Image (cartoon, rainbow, N blue to C red):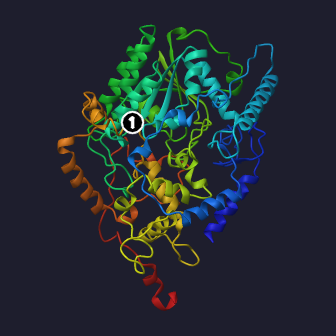
Amino acid sequence: SSRNASVERGMDRERQSDTSDSETTDVRRINQQPGIREGRYDPNRFRLHFEKESREEVERRKKLAREKVLDQMLDKDLEVDINDIYPTEKGQSLEFPRRPPWNYGMNREELLRKEEKSYREYLNDLHSRNPPGSLSHFEHNLETWRQLWRVLEMSDVILLIVDIRHPVLQFPPALYHYITGELQKQVVVVLNKADLCPPPLVLAWTHYLQTQFPHLHCVCFTSHPGQPYSTVLQKKRMRKKGTCGWGHAGGPTHILKACQEITAGKVDLSSWEKKIQRDAVAMGSEGEQSEEGADSVLVEHQSDVAMEMSSPSQELYKDGVLTLGCIGFPNVGKSSVLNSLVGRKVVSVSRTPGHTKYFQTYYLTPTVKLCDCPGLVFPSLVNKQLQILAGIYPVSQLQEPYSSVGYLCERTPFLSVLKLRHPSEREQGPEHSWTAWDVCEAWAERRGYKTAKAARNDVYRAANSLLRLAVDGRLCLCLRPPAYNDQREQWESHPDLAEIIALQGRKEEEGAGERDEEEEGESSSEPEEERDRDADDDDEDGDDEDDGFGHPAVKERKGPTSLTVNMFDVLRENECE
């Protein structure tokens, strides 16, 4: 069966060799890429390495998903304090691996051995202070941590990109204190995907982070202003005239203003400001960017030797150039932010965590350059199911997705949104108790997901589909800062609310009528069963999130050539029997 074939392929991937310097044995290596071509970089060098889970733990959670009745959580339960995720008490604080000190008297091999030894000592100390199972999934690949060290050393200002739906999961305080304390550099946190959160909640998170970290610069960002999802099953975002394309992203100007405040005139950023204005003008009314208006951007691939033997520069803004380092967890939209700053697509975008595989430098202007770092996961105490819903762990690699579905359903109005019918509705009365397994089975029934052999409801595929809806933002789970529900009225009447609404591209007065008309057109032009991006669809090329942006959407022709073929009619009824 296809299910067994996929399992065999996964086992083959585990048996293949790996290029990591980490010697941790209980590590699962995921996102295997095709073999190395001659003269090319190793695509598996920065693949995600997470700690393996025992078979007993996986089976325990699977059994719990079948038996535990889902209880709807209160709004108060969605409030999360960053100190619960990253404890700061002495002896319990969660640090990240640092680059050991070195000097130019060392050769390359000696430096690498010293880094490996330091990293192994870090892992041993971390696991000795935390009981098994208490830590979340976090990166075990030393090569990826090396990329972070290089970016922090090369950059003048760090852009730490987080998802506004759950920013405290992706903002390690230890990293902030290391950058602002030991490195004496500034941090700009980019609250990405601001269009997926209610405007009052965006303001509340901004205020919370600035209160917790006084020297932090907060910037809200969205790559899709004015393009919400009209329905849960909608495959792509709604596109409005004049809002497609990277030049219309909301937030590049705010990042520019934050950098102007930090540099305080030490770097001439006028060329960057003019570039942002040109990118906006170059976008046509339908979102097309003319070739004449596109600025050329120099892309530089850093060699390993140049990066490994580079020392931290004590001089900021060397040669009058501002270097921005872009770092963040996987799947926070870091590549989308880079594309928006450049003004066109230079990095493929994917919902697959760990899609960025190597280090690159982009020269926006003669005085501004960007350093891109592969996404990596810091150790924390966050619930692993919440990590999966945040897109930190690849959905396609999950051995047991049902507990994450249960975690999602307890915190969202899934019955009214998904419009599910209980699998045992005919036998029981109108009131039912739902388990995570029931939700997956009902979703499989509604979507028509069947197993290949017995034609039973494919609950595994249904669970993957629901998790992808959550990661994409179509079934949205937004965490809240402490005391948000008590102060909700204050944030709903805040004077800065209009600025957030403008950034998101929302129009409260005319939005409802326009969305209803566009939703009607969307549903009429595409069958309902085709609106959902199935869980079995591959996203390795990373382009599905960007399809249609920068180019007018091409609609399918409708006519006599567009037919729905019933294969049972083709084979004839007697042949099917």
Please name whichever residue, 35 or 391, is drawn nearer the observer in this view of the structure: 391
Q: Position of residue 483 (x, y in %)?
A: 39, 36
- Give the residue displayed 47% in from the left and 36% down from the top: 167
Q: Secondary structure at mark 1?
A: loop
- As drawn, the residue found furthest toward the bottom would be 574
Q: Position of residue 427 (x, y in %)?
A: 42, 81
Query: Is 351 placed left or right of 417 in the picture?
Result: right
Residue carrying label 1: 483
The answer to which image quadrant residue 486 occupies is top left
- Image position of 451 with respect to 491: above or below: below
Answer few, some or many: residues within 10 Å of disc 1's Cα (few below 14, many 20 plus, some between 14 and 19). few
Q: Amino acid at mark 1?
A: Ala
Q: Position of residue 70 (x, y in %)?
A: 47, 60
Query: Is 304 placed left or right of 569 in the picture?
Result: right
Please name whichever residue, 121 or 334, is drawn nearer the observer in this view of the structure: 121
Q: Is residue 247 visible?
A: no
Query: Is 324 placed left or right of 147 in the picture?
Result: left
Q: Position of residue 4 (x, y in %)?
A: 66, 67
Please name whichever residue, 126 or 460, is drawn nearer the observer in this view of the structure: 126
- Image position of 118 with respect to 136: above or below: above
Q: In the rendered view of the protein, which quadrant contains the N terminus?
A: bottom right
Q: How many numbered circles are shown?
A: 1
Q: Is residue 444 visible?
A: yes
- Give the residue displayed 45% in from the left and 51% down from the top: 470
